Amino acid sequence: MSEKPIPASPPCFACEMDEAYAGYLPKGELAAALERLLTLAAATTQGRWQEMLAPIVARLNDSPAKALPSSQSDLVPGTLEQEARALLPRIKDDGIHAALKRLIETPDAPP
């Protein structure tokens, strides 16, 4: 009777680790970050951003998304794009990542 071979190393369980451990935002934090972007979009009348973000936030929260009241201190020029760009590396969902990247890279249509 031969002995069963012993593997040199244990199997990898990386696919089972928490997304936050890999640096990605957990669902609740991602929803909160996107709600902030939605609020900034509403305050700066960025309709295209609102149209794209509202359904994503609603899906993450399992309820309709709404822009929260924003203070004037939040309304720094360029903040919306800067915050969105800073979120990109922390978004694991390919669909959300692609949608946000499109918003950043596609300039608003001229009036």
Image (cartoon, grey):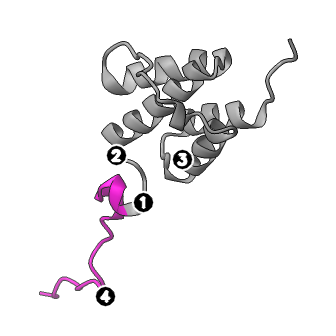
What count of labels does the image hold? 4
- The quarter of the picture where residue 82 lies is top right
Residue 22: x and y in percent read 40, 61
Q: Residues within 10 Å of mark 2 (few under 14, many from 20)?
A: some
Residue 2: x and y in percent read 16, 88
- Residue reaching furthest right? 110
- Region of the chain picked out in magenta, as a range: 1-21
Q: Sequence order check: which comes first, mark 4 or mark 2?
A: 4
Residue 84 covered by magenta stretch: no
Q: Which residue is mark 1?
A: 23
Q: Sequence order check: which comes first, mark 3 or mark 1?
A: 1
Q: Residues within 10 Å of mark 3 (few under 14, many from 20)?
A: some
Camera-near label (3 vs 4) is 3
- For the residues bearing labels 4 and 2, Cβ distance under 8 angstroms: no
Residue 14 covered by magenta stretch: yes
Q: Amino acid at mark 2?
A: Pro
Camera-near label (2 vs 3) is 3
Q: Which mark is residue 26?
A: 2
Q: Secondary structure at mark 4?
A: loop
